[in-house]
Amino acid sequence: MSPVRAVETVFAAGWAALWLYWLVAAFSVKRGKVPWSRELRIRAVIVVIVVVLARLGVLRGHGLNTSPWRSALGMAFLGLGLGSAVWARVHIGRNWGTPMTQKNEPELVTSGPYHLVRHPIYSGILVAGTGTAVALSWLWLIAVGLVGIYFLYSAAVEERFLAQQFPDTYPAYKRSTKMLLPLVF
């Protein structure tokens, strides 16, 4: 197996393991509701953008990275990002849900990775996506950017809901932590 193919395999296995864990863990969450019309609209916009970019040829004809340094740096970001996302998912436990889920009996989780940022799962996935772009192809930054837009929108919707559910505690938590990047944003 060529080194480029081996790097691709590591990334595919890492992402597959994350999504498999996500699917299995989804069976243990609290009930809630998702404002589906809102979520479907933003997902539809992202799909349309990807289809347009593909039709324009933006996603074709670009070789994969062959730099060992970029591969190693990308793998480090992948491991850090996926590890952070899983840590946050384990820590939030049954309170987890798909983006913008409104739980029937919500709890405000502010410890563990949630002490560092308000949306550590989103942060971890974006860091892992950036690692994928660094290691494989800068074109992955398009996907990371689109997912980032979706996560920012989802975070804003979730934060409005949390502010309504926890009017005494959420504003202080929001002031004391950043949204996605500790000490930055």
Image: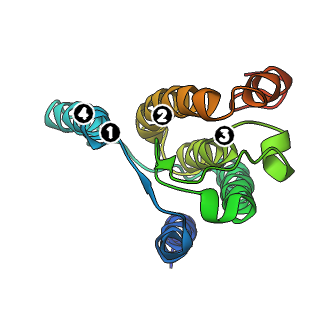
Distance CA(mark 2)–CA(mark 1): 8 Å
- Mark 2 touches mark 1? (CB < 8 Å): yes
Distance CA(mark 3)–CA(mark 1): 17 Å
- Mark 1 touches mark 4? (CB < 8 Å): yes
Distance CA(mark 2)–CA(mark 4): 12 Å
Mark 4, other Cα within 10 Å: few <14 / some 14–19 / many ≥20: few
The amino acid on which the numbered mark 4 sits, given as a three-letter code, is Arg
Residue at x 54%, y 67% (from the top left corner): 29
Residue designated by label 2:
154
Res. 41 mark: 4
Distance CA(mark 4)–CA(mark 3): 22 Å
Residue 115 image offset from top left, x and y in percent: 85, 41
Residue 20 image offset from top left, x and y in percent: 49, 74
First in residue order: circle 4 vs circle 3: 4
- Mark 4 touches mark 3? (CB < 8 Å): no
Residue designated by label 3:
119
Residue 26 image offset from top left, x and y in percent: 49, 69
First in residue order: circle 2 vs circle 3: 3
Res. 39 mark: 1
Mark 2, other Cα within 10 Å: few <14 / some 14–19 / many ≥20: many
Mark 3, other Cα within 10 Å: few <14 / some 14–19 / many ≥20: many
The kind of secondary structure element at disc 3 is loop
First in residue order: circle 3 vs circle 1: 1
The amino acid on which the numbered mark 3 sits, given as a three-letter code, is His
The amino acid on which the numbered mark 1 sits, given as a three-letter code, is Glu
Distance CA(mark 2)–CA(mark 3): 10 Å
First in residue order: circle 2 vs circle 4: 4
Q: Where, by quadrant of the figure, is residue 84 drawn?
A: bottom right
Q: Where, by quadrant of the figure, is residue 71 drawn?
A: bottom right
Q: Total of numbered circles in the picture?
A: 4
Horizontal arrangement in the rendering, residue 114 relative to residue 167 (left or right):
right
